Amino acid sequence: MASINPYISVPAKVEDVIVETPTIKTLVFKPERPVAFEAGQFIELSIPGFGEAPFTPSSSPAVKERMEVTIMKVGAVTEKVHALAKGDEVGIRGPLGVPYPLDRFRGRELAIVGGGVGLAPLRALLFALFEDMKSYKKILLRYGARTPSDIVYREAVTRGWDKGIDVMLTVDEGDKDWKGNVGVVTTVCEKDKLKCHPDSGVAVVCGPPIMMKFATLKLLERGYAKKDIYLSMEKNMSCGIGKCGHCRIGPYYACKDGPVFPYDRIENEPRIWD
């Protein structure tokens, strides 16, 4: 069987657009042919006549006929993506990069820490875990958002996922209706709020760089081994295949050697949190 050309996109149509928060939307794409991916991998999403950018699918890896991508509006390409409507055509190139190593997670307790739109790739991971729940001792999710209105997948995290896994949410600023924790995400990683077993468990972190930095430091403080903390390092992955050099992390390329890295592999590289 001939290999797939990594430079060529699969045509896809927008099937639905879901508004998650004032700045975040989930787009549902139906590709011309099935696109298989593993949790943690990313795709290059192209808008004909404008350009492309990397995004991590947020849907279940078990579903290949459709793909969901959750995107925050932060720049020119994402503004164009947010303007897409049902029936619009795009291109999907990939999947690309290194996925979460589920084989290393099986049989262990898994603590997942996310912030903001970083819950998107973690959603794909959770769907993959849900397919084989009996293989994991326990799954804990700690997620932080700026305000209650900024919580992504709010229905799922408040009324769905908490029935199968240990979920705790926090916001930087509450409102009159918020009854949960108030504080940055590390406040729900303290011993009284994250009852875990760092000596034998695995942790996964995904979110804004500053959040990932302090969440990683907190997990190290709790006793997790550096090799057991997995980070999703989504740098400027322009080409997606290690040719342009924009996503360098020391000797590594986030697009080709990552974006999923164990912390001990990159801890000594400069400016990893930029």
Image: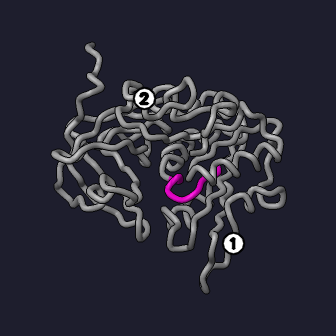
Which image quadrant is residue 108 in? top right
Query: Would residue 126 be found to the left or right of residue 201 on screen?
Result: left
Q: Residue placed farthest to the bottom in the image?
A: 176
| Residue 202 screen position, x and y as percent | 71, 38
Residue at 72%, 58% in the rendered image: 186
| Residue 144 screen position, x and y as percent | 62, 62
Residue at 31%, 55% in the rendered image: 76
The number of numbered discs placed on residues in the rendered structure image is: 2
**Between 221 and 269, which is closer to the camera in this rendering?**
269
Residue corresponding to mark 1: 182
Q: Range of the magenta residues?
A: 112-119
Give me the disc on residue 246.
none
Query: Would residue 46 be found to the left or right of residue 121 on screen?
Result: left
> Which of the two labelled residues, at mark 1 and mark 2, occupies the earlier sequence position?
1
The amino acid type of the residue labelled 2 equals: Gly
Q: Split into 4 quadrants, where in the image is the N terminus?
A: top left
**Between 104 and 130, which is closer to the camera in this rendering?**
104
Q: Looking at the image, is mark 1 or mark 2 nearer the viewer?
A: 2
The amino acid type of the residue labelled 1 equals: Val
Residue corresponding to mark 2: 245
| Residue 263 screen position, x and y as percent | 67, 34
